[in-house]
Amino acid sequence: MIDFPRINDAAIGALPALLSRWLPDGRRMGHEWVARNPTRADRKAGSFRVNMHSGRWADFATGDKGGDPISLAAYLSGIGQADAARALAEMLGVSK
């Protein structure tokens, strides 16, 4: 069994570092990370945002969205949530 809540909690604690790694051209605006969406030909930052307190994210140009860091990792990597959770747990040193 994968402990999704535990992995998400650890990821939220490390979210500034994770977002800098995953979305390096982004910047913090208040409690959000605003970046270009690397999964599409997004020319400027603004429509892709991640809430740095909750991990909720959305691309307001496409309607893609998710509720936590695992779903963001899955979306950005183009993999399923279970695989994203395993990879994130390994990256953060959290037992799955």
Image: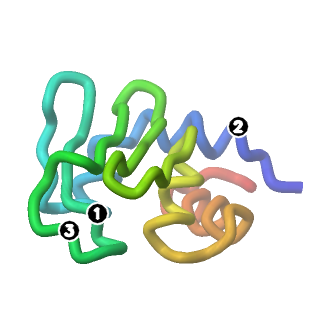
Which residue corresponds to the image point at 46% horizontal and 37% vertical from the top-left?
55
Which label number is shown at residue 37? Answer: 1
Q: CA distance from mark 1 to mark 3?
A: 6 Å
Residue 32 image point, x, y percent: 26, 32
Marks 1,3: beta carbons within 8 A? yes
Screen quadrant of the N terminus: bottom right
Which label number is shown at residue 5? Answer: 2
Viewer-nearest residue: 34 or 22: 34
Q: Amino acid at mark 1?
A: Asn
Residue 64 image point, x, y percent: 48, 54
Q: Is residue 84 left or right of residue 45?
A: right
Q: Is residue 16 left or right of residue 12?
A: left
Q: Residues within 10 Å of mark 3 (few under 14, many from 20)?
A: some
Instruction: Identify the secondary structure beneath mark 2.
Output: helix
Screen quadrant of the C terminus: bottom right
Note whether 63 is above or below 40 in the view shown: above
Q: Amino acid at mark 2?
A: Pro
Residue at label 3? 42
Which residue corresponds to the image point at 59% horizontal and 68% vertical from the top-left?
87
Image colouring: rainbow
Q: CA distance from mark 3 to mark 2?
A: 31 Å
Marks 3,2: beta carbons within 8 A? no
Q: Compare marks 3 and 2 and give the one earlier in the sequence.
A: 2
Which label number is shown at residue 65? Answer: none
